[in-house]
Image (cartoon, helix red, strand yellow):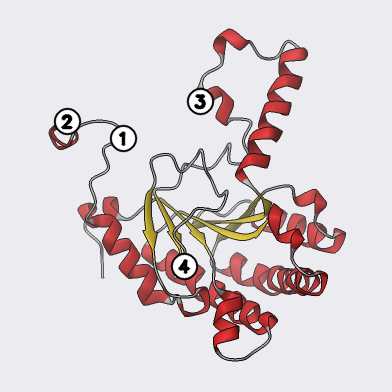
Amino acid sequence: MTKSKDQITQIPNHVAIIMDGNGRWAKKRKLPRIEGHRKGVNNVKKIVRHASDLGIKYLTLFAFSVENWNRPKLEVDALMQLLLRFIKSQTKEMKKNKIRLGVIGRIKELPSKVVKALEKSMDETKHFDHLNLVLALNYGSRTEVLDAVKSFSTAFKNNEESIDDLDWNRFSNYLYTDNIPDPDLIIRTSGEKRISNFLLLQGAYSEYYFTDKYWPDFHEQELSEAIESYKKRERRFGKTGEQVNTN
């Protein structure tokens, strides 16, 4: 069915998701935590397809945080193996569906096999633009800000930047997300109502949607419901409702 212009403009351009609850999903079923992560990876494939079908242009998934290294080594190793298999198995699917892969975070600190697979997949999909799938890996917003400050400081020392000219737009070029629009909608699954060091600056004016569903149970219908909730909201960006409606 062809969408009207009004319907298209109501779809968020960029949706970001904090995929939470894999471990609790498994515990509830008396399964090892890794089974929850496996189920979560399978759900990623479904949500990516559905986001593409809905017309979302950017989908950012919080897959592994800088704090996640503190988890048991066996779990971290298993997560890295799942990530590696996901990248290798899904690159063909991304190419078929014209999906570009991107990554934000300190990816060079990931296992070398994972880094190589990511770089290969990003290179093979870099010309596509039907959907931009962005994986937040070894990501933390505070770490991102520190890295941005260091990069800007280096540019300043090299006389490439001026303190007097520094504003938000200029500084944002040094964030991991320099070529990615700010998220319109940020979703968190599992019932937790916090943002866990995720896109703190980029999400300044994002709409938030919290659901009790664990990530493995956050299916296509749940994403559609989150989008419907988003459509009903008035985004003012510091203006009054009257100003927004007048414009």
**What type is the residue that disc 4 sits on?**
Thr
The residue labelled by disc 1 is 237
The residue shown at (43%, 75%) is 213
Image side of residue 189 versus residue 98, left or right: left
The residue shown at (17%, 37%) is 241
Asked whether the residues under the numbered discs 1 and 3 touch, taking CB atoms below 8 Å apart as contact, a structural biologist would say: no
Quadrant including the N terminus: bottom left
**What type is the residue that disc 1 sits on?**
Phe
Residue at disc 3, secondary structure: helix
As measured in the structure, the alpha-carbon distance from the residue carrying label 4 to the one carrying label 2 is 33 Å
The residue labelled by disc 4 is 189
Q: Quadrant of residue 165?
A: top right
The residue labelled by disc 2 is 243
Tell me the crowding category of disc 3: few under 14, some 14 to 19, or many 20 or more residues within 10 angstroms, Cα based: few
The residue shown at (64%, 89%) is 31
Q: Please give the label number shown on residue 169.
A: 3
Asked whether the residues under the numbered discs 1 and 4 touch, taking CB atoms below 8 Å apart as contact, a structural biologist would say: no
